[in-house]
Amino acid sequence: MTRWRDPLPWTALALVALSVGMPWLKPVFAALFPGLDRPLYEQDTFPALVFAHVVLVGVSSGIAVVVGVAAGVAVTRPAGREFRPLVESVVAMGQTWPPVAVLAVAAPLTGFGETPALVALTVYGLLPIVRQTIAGLEAVPAAAREAAEGLGMDAGQRLRQVELPLALPVIVSGIRTSVVINIGTASVASTVGAKSLGSPIIVGLSGFNTAYVIQGALLVGLLAIVADLVFALLGRWAARWRHR
């Protein structure tokens, strides 16, 4: 019974069904918006847009995780504590800039396409990861560190075998926030030529085609919900693994 109540499979199924079956809804959008000559976005297939969106978010989030966790670990070590205010200020600044502004700066330097989008999404996704990594490591009980030290572990072993496993649920929550934010933010990447679910949204906004905007927004919303549910599952697994 618990499996049937789990929303993740049903939400993932809805995402796949809607992306594949969107052409079948063309009569529905035509009826809802009778003034539109083209009620369905057909420049790309929706499964291709979903895949491109996932790749864009996945690559940028992967880079953000590596950089963010490494930065969070570094500033909680004795040698890096003095750099903590600088690191926190830099990553906070990255999220206070609007994504469009980051794209506007990156596009002339790297060219149009996926590269400026990856830069913008990586910068935008760092703050939650860095903050939660620091919070998770600082929340590790002093008794756990002392016990590890008493067992003869060096600093690297304590980090890998004690601190990071105990901090993992908090770190996963930061990654979860970062990924969900970037799923929505990645829609803006289509303004610099990157293929994503933002393509029908941007085209719809520029061409006053509300149907396109709804089609893209529905899939972005479902994708964000699926990602959030996946990370909620990972968070529960990390919490159980922590107590083993």
Image: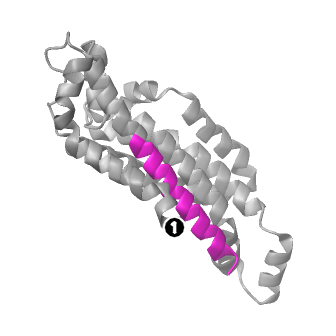
Residue 29 visible in the current orientation? yes
Q: What's the colour scheme?
A: one colour
State the residue in front, 132 or 239.
239
Badge 1 density bin: few <14, some 14–19, many ≥20, Cα 10 Å: few
Where does the image place residue 193, in percent across and percent down from the top left? 25, 31
Vertical comparison of 79 with 183: above or below: below
Q: Residue furthest bottom?
A: 151
Where does the image place residue 144, in percent across and percent down from the top left? 80, 77
Where, quadrant-wise, is the C terminus in this rendering?
bottom right
Q: Is residue 185 left or right of residue 85?
A: left
* Count of numbered circles in the view: 1
Q: Is residue 242 magenta?
A: yes
Where does the image place residue 218, in percent across and percent down from the top left? 36, 34
Which residue appears at 70% of the width and 77% of the height?
A: 243
Please identify the dominant SS of the magenta region.
helix
State the residue in front, 66 or 2.
2
Return the residue at label 1.
1
State the residue in front, 71 or 30.
30
Please tell me whether mark 1 sits on a helix, a strand or a loop. loop
Which residue appears at 66% of the width and 38% of the height?
A: 89
Q: Quadrant of residue 24?
A: top left
Where does the image place residue 94, in percent across and percent down from the top left? 55, 35
Which residue appears at 23% of the width and 26% of the height?
A: 28
Which residue appears at 29% of the width and 40% of the height?
A: 114
Vertical comparison of 68 with 196: above or below: below
Instruction: Magenta stretch: give its range.
Output: 222-244
Q: Amino acid at mark 1?
A: Met
Q: Is residue 47 left or right of residue 220?
A: left
Q: Residue furthest top?
A: 35
Q: Is residue 78 magenta?
A: no
Q: Is residue 195 left or right of residue 242?
A: left
